[in-house]
Amino acid sequence: MGVVIITGASRGLGASAAIHAARRGMGVILTYNSHPAGAEEVVRQVEAAGGKAVALALDVGKVASFSAFRDKVAAALKATWGRDRFDALVNNAGYGAFNPIETVTEAEFDGLLNVHLKGPFFLTQVLLPLMADGGQIINMTSATTRVATAGTAPYASFKGGLEVLTRCIAKEFGPRRIRANSVSPGAIRTDMTSEALDQSPEFVELLAGQTALGRIGVPDDVGRVVASLLSEDNAWVNAQNIEVAGGYSI
Ligand SMILES: NC(=O)c1ccc[n+]([C@@H]2O[C@H](COP(=O)([O-])OP(=O)(O)OC[C@H]3O[C@@H](n4cnc5c(N)ncnc54)[C@H](OP(=O)(O)O)[C@@H]3O)[C@@H](O)[C@H]2O)c1
């Protein structure tokens, strides 16, 4: 089944994807930024399920740190799995921010750009030489790329860029049989969204009402899809954006 690297898997969607991938037999290298304890808890859950996982620190906004990260990945692959290559990369790490176009600052714009587009771009570039031929990349984007949502302009624009990048990766690395897809969640209750959702039950009701299946999502709604995409069952799915949103705004 191989080894998957999942960025931002100390909680939320990444943690769910890590646990579901491990349940399907994959080894997991998961990254954290500010919550090492969350990452260790995910490692513990993977091990309790009989799998293997390693947690590494990574700030996806700091491109200069990526080659040192690649060296740590290589060491972890050797020490834990006795191999030189990994099989899949899930660019999931990210954060949300409410940024109306009229008031967003350059620093807020650059912060989102670095984590949601520039970081995945250069992390993929740095890690591709370590990826086995026949491997795959999944980029976590957002349903805000399809449904314009006030206050998300920079975030949604960079996620949209990530969807384009996904197709470019599929094109350029097809000769190595590497496939690339993006997964595009609707509103999911995680640490990223819970404050906004808790502040406004009406907002939750509105989102649920705009969703064919009548509710907002939970992390496992997305984690299961990521794990499934990683499996051989989806080996012919390539260069697609897969919205995982229960039928949001259709
Ligand atoms: N929740 C939603 O409704 C929703 C909808 C559409 C798309 N998404 C996307 O799904 C992804 C995961 O979101 P989530 O809801 O699971 O959020 P979350 O629960 O807040 O988790 C975010 C994860 O990303 C990591 N992270 C944040 N900034 C980072 C940075 N600069 N460098 C490295 N890691 C960083 C965090 O690490 P630490 O905890 O260690 O700091 C954490 O593991 C994001 O890309 C988000 O944009 C979420």
Image (spheres, rainbow, N blue to C red):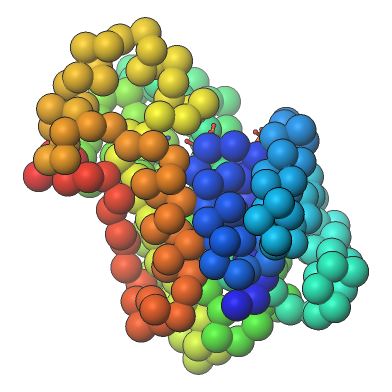
Answer whether residue 226 is visible to the viewer in this image.
yes
> Given the current orientation, which residue lies at the most extreme top position?
199
Q: Is residue 22 above or below residue 84?
A: above
The structure residue drawn at horizontal position 26% and vertical position 25%, both measured from the top left corner, is 150
Determine the residue positioned at 43% across, 25% down.
193
Q: How many marks?
A: 0
Q: Is residue 75 above or below residue 13?
A: below
Please name the residue shown 17% across and 46% down the image: 247
Instruction: State the residue in front, 5 or 220.
Output: 220
Image side of residue 37 versus residue 246, left or right: right
Left or right: residue 73 versus residue 222 is: right
For the question of whether residue 165 can be seen, the reply is no
Q: Position of residue 62 (x, y in %)?
A: 72, 44
Q: Position of residue 245 (x, y in %)?
A: 26, 45
Q: Quadrant of the C terminus?
A: top left
Q: Taking 110 as reference, is 119 above or below it?
A: below
- Residue 197 higher or lower than 146, as above or below: above
**What x and y, as percent, mark residue 189?**
40, 29
Toward the viewer: 30 or 172?
Answer: 30
Q: Is residue 9 left or right of residue 167?
A: right
